[in-house]
Amino acid sequence: MNSRPSLTRRRFLQATATLAASSAGDVPALALISLDKPSRADYLAQADILVETLQTKRFRTEPYSQWGDEQNAWNTCNTLEALIDYTQITGNRRYYDQIHHAATDQVLLKKVMGDGVDDEAWAGIVMVKAYRLTKERSCLDAAKIIFDSMTTYWDDTCGGGVWWNFTRTYKNAITNELFLVLATQLYRETRTPLYLEWAKKEWDWFARSGMINADNLINDGLHECKNNNGETWTYNQGVVLGGLVELSRITGDKMYREQAVKIAGAVMTKMSPLCNGVPILQEVGGELNHDQQQFKGIFMRYLANLALVLPEKGTPGRKAIRDYICANATSLWRIARTDQNEINAYWHETERKPIYTTITQTSCLDLLNAALSLTK
């Protein structure tokens, strides 16, 4: 009997040794394993299945555009964004009419704008993306209105930052990250200097806020103007990447990209336990509620955006991120999918009770979109 470790095992050991050798303050070069990795055609076929399921079985227009009863309005905005991304990445315009309907649905827009400062930010971001696809001016106008609304929730408490809620009781990471992304996206479309000024102001405050911890992970928010050591939700690690990538593109300042790489590398090593030899993204906490079911896909969406501006090799570079995303997509499709193409909230083998919702389907579509955008 040959006692030499198998190729899979050897690569597993190599990956483990690489991670173990990295110091806590470094971003390691990930030696990721991805044997018999699916091709872009495979990811495209999988994404087609998910989108068709969402559109034919879940989409409805009453009382407003929505995919599934379990969705809150901000979840709906994320499903719309994933569908727009799918359309842009694949060139498949089969669902253009539904996208246009949802993006111009004033009932949905009014609903999400009434749910919270962070919720309206999700709407603002997807409205910019909808404008890029449809050239519907009302979408861009809506995003501008939302941005103006958000600026009214910025004040000097804790030295700056946008409040999470209308009652101004909590300043947190996600609302300010979304504000950063929306500012950069509006600048990209309009070249209005005010948006770039706000984006820089937001990041300067965020970087000083204390919410980025010693592990280069972002905690949930502030308590008495200090890091509350709240959960490091995956979407908090993801959305900020989007703002930093755009700031890097706009200004040419590599400082923003370097910070994004640190955060991404921390997630890939510290929030992605090895499962069958590959690091699989896992959400913190216990059983996932409807909001938390959305988070991992959002991280992957923005991680792919970062990879597209990185060199092929690095710590991590585009290849390392591509391998990581593809390994997660492969694990999800093989382990977390039913015969009816329902997707579990957990992308790895687990004894936890599976969760199958429209939201978990959307999160999976975000992951497949990410894999598609990085494979040829």
Image (cartoon, grey):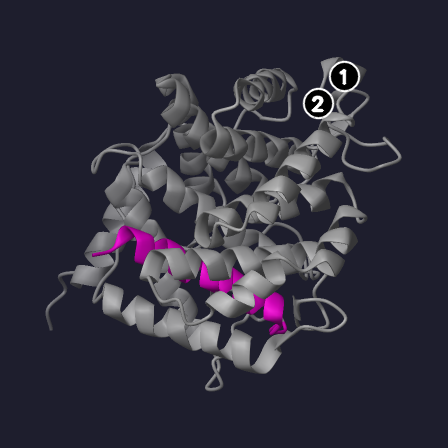
Q: Main secondary structure of the magenta part?
A: helix
Residue 222 falls left or right of residue 371: right
Q: Quadrant of residue 321?
A: top left
Residue at screen point 49% across, 62% down: 83
Q: In which quadrant is the N terminus drawn?
A: bottom left
Residue at screen point 45% across, 25% down: 247
Res. 275 visible in picture: no
**In front here: 7 or 217?**
217
Question: Could you tell me if the residues under marks 1 and 2 are in contact, i.e. CB atoms within 8 Å?
Answer: yes
**In front here: 293 or 243?**
243
Q: Which residues are magenta?
A: 353-376
Image: 318 above or below 133? above
Helix, strand or loop under label 1:
helix
Residue 66's disc number: none
Amino acid type assigned to the residue bearing label 2 in the image: Gly
Image: 373 above or below 354? above
Residue 31 falls left or right of residue 117: left
Helix, strand or loop under label 2:
loop
> Which is more foreground, mark 1 or mark 2?
2
Total marks in image: 2
Give the x, y percent position of residue 335.
43, 73
Crowd band around label 2 with a 10 angstrom C-alpha radius: few (<14), some (14–19), many (20+): many
Give the x, y percent position of residue 300.
45, 50
Mark 1 → mark 2, Cα distance in angstroms: 7 Å
Query: Which residue extends farthest bottom?
Result: 339
Q: Quadrant of residue 256?
A: top left
Residue 161's disc number: 2
**In front here: 120 or 283?**
120
Residue 158's disc number: 1
Residue 308 falls left or right of residue 36: right
Give the x, y percent position of residue 52.
46, 77
